[in-house]
Image (cartoon, rainbow, N blue to C red):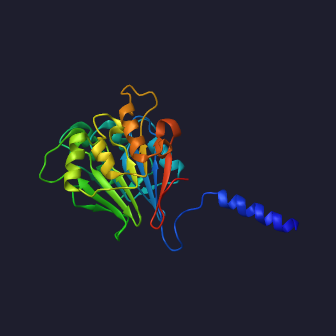
Amino acid sequence: MKLFWILIVAAVINGCMYVSGAAEGETSMHATAIDVGQGLAVLFEYGGRYAMYDFGPDSVGVVDSLLARGVDTLDWVVLSHNHRDHIGGFLELAGRGVFVRRLYMGPDTAGAFFRDSVLRVARALGTPVDTLLRGENVSFGGGDNGFEVLWPASYLRVGENRASVVLLGKFGASKMLLTGDLDSVGERHVLEMNPTLSADLLQVAHHGSAGSNTLSFLSQVSPKYAFVSVGAGNRYGHPAPSVVRKLNLVLGDSLKLYRTDLQGSIRFELSPSMGVLVP
């Protein structure tokens, strides 16, 4: 009888534990929004391989965070646009023991100083550099799992926030939308080109700025979860209260909105069979 109750208690405890949603034989993709203060850096892990979308600002320890996680090689890095709070951390890679196999940048026509600085670091690392445009793909070695570039389009000349490279990650039943600092005009263009766009997990554009995140865009994407990468007490007032209200409306539950200023680094699992899971 005692053994019976021990087994029951063990079953209850195990039932309350987080278990990876990946079915036997499939590989989940993990996405971690690293707490970089007022900036953006997202680390991807897929089958023991790593990549990054944006690198956060300089002097906040992004490289140290990678090394602490045992990451010494990144298959690729996508830098959404040429603003310091998104690419500054890349400038600290030289001589730090983290190798980048390939660097992707958008066609941002602004921020030449930071872009040139990034290119100098890439040359020092021996990292090839490519420009990403709508219709191209980035992945961990092919197959159906990877990221489709939704924006910018090749026939438009854009700079600053509107030039942000927008990626739609597809991993079986899971979809993740990365928007960088895309503004409301860029959002409208993306919807015009992708009228059925949807995603389970949304990176909230421009740290929750009121100049982005229109209700029409958020409603169309209709995420189940969303996260804001933002600095505590930042001088911009991000995320804007109006954007938080819209997100809570679309998500249907304020607990499904995650913020690095409140929760630190946040890790999501994109399971091919179970969708997005939050430990």
Image location of residue 18, percent across then percent down: 60, 57
Question: For the view shown, which residue lies furthest in the right direction?
Answer: 1
Image location of residue 222, percent across then percent down: 36, 51
Question: For the view shown, which residue lies furthest in the top direction?
Answer: 235
159 left or right of 228 in image: left
Image location of residue 238, percent across then percent down: 38, 32
Q: From the viewer's side, name the closer residue of 127 and 276.
A: 276
Q: From the viewer's side, name the closer residue of 266 and 193.
A: 193
Instruction: Say which residue appears at 37% left-offset and 66% top-offset.
Output: 145
Question: Residue 90 sits in which quadrant?
Answer: top left
Question: For the view shown, which residue lies furthest in the left direction?
Answer: 155
Question: Residue 143 sits in which quadrant?
Answer: bottom left
Observer able to see residue 169:
yes
Image location of residue 257, percent across then percent down: 46, 43
- Whether residue 216 is situated above or below residue 276 in the rendered picture: above
Instruction: Say which residue appears at 85% left-offset and 67% top-offset.
Output: 3
- Whether residue 197 is situated above or below residue 94 in the rendered picture: below
Instruction: Say which residue appears at 35% left-offset and 53% top-offset.
Output: 177
- Whether residue 169 is situated above or below residue 252 in the rendered picture: below
